[in-house]
Image (cartoon, grey):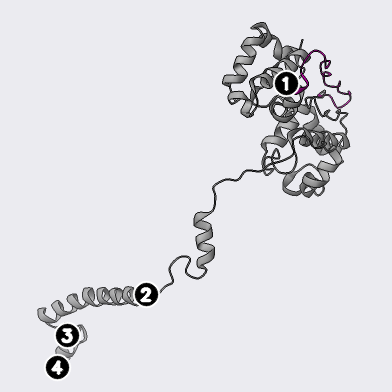
Amino acid sequence: MSDNNHHEEAHTGPIKNPKQLLVAVILSFVVPIFAIIGLVLYVTADNKPAAGSANPEKAIAERIQKIGMVEIRDANRPLRGGEEVYKGQCAACHATGAAGAPKLGDAAEWGPRIKTGFDTLVQSALKGKNAMAPQGGGEFNDTEIARAVAYMANAGGAKFAEPAAAGAPSADASPASTAAPVAAAAPASAVSANGEALYKQACQVCHGAGIAGAPKFGDKTAWAPRLAAGIDAVYASAVQGKGGMPARGGAQASDEDLRAAVEYMAETAK
């Protein structure tokens, strides 16, 4: 008899009646809840500095900083050569091959790129490609960037001509051929000197390299359908804007000077 009682007690747990079971169930839910609440209160009770309170001057400066900025450059300064532009802006990556940039003088790396043509290389430099950011801004203008492209490509086996100051950055796509010079400017007697000056100051950025579909300077094929409509129609497009070109080409110029610039470009394409 005693052996049977001992056997039954061996299988008996700490909960011996319904009341004990109810208490155990309640505690298993209530205790963790209060533990979580206590932990949250402990974490959130600590005082934390507001954003910017550690350096209020910096925080204020960041909140009121300008969205953009205006940079004024001398449009009439002498344009720099390709080697100078390369050393000032391109060498940081192209001298060492950083971020996948083709190294200066490496014919194997430049060969496939040269085959795409000079204009394609210039557009890649101006608009940016892969890890390379757009290079059209900063200290150099588009023609100077094009000169740097010619300098680097030629070091890799091309024979591109360096773009002239008043011409388009155009060269033959074949690495074994020499690019023909850009069409010469029209005689001074044919157009106003103000037209040439305005072209160099405002129009050359797009028309020099054919950016955003602009007809390239001296390109008779690109200008032919436009000139067929008459010089008045071409001038009207310049005044009103067309395609990627803003009204008046984005220039603050008189009607006379703007028309002179249109006539100057048109004369080189006839």
* Residue 43 numbered tag: 2
Magenta residues, start to end: 173-194
Could you tell me what secondary structure mostly forms the magenta stretch? loop
The residue identified by callout 4 is 2
Mark 1 Cα within 10 Å, few/some/many (few <14, many 20+)?
many
137 shown above or below 11: above
Whether 179 is among the magenta residues is yes
The residue identified by callout 1 is 216
Of callouts 1 and 2, which one flags the residue occurring earlier in the amino acid sequence? 2
- Residue 26, quarter of the rendered image: bottom left
Give the residue type at disc 2: Val
Residue 130 showing in the rendered view: yes
Residue at 58% over, 21% down? 241
Residue 244 x, y percent position in the rendering: 60, 25
Quadrant where the image shows the N terminus: bottom left
Between the C-alphas of marks 2 and 4, the distance is 57 Å
Give the residue type at disc 4: Ser
Residue at 67% over, 27% down? 211
Residue 91 x, y percent position in the rendering: 80, 47
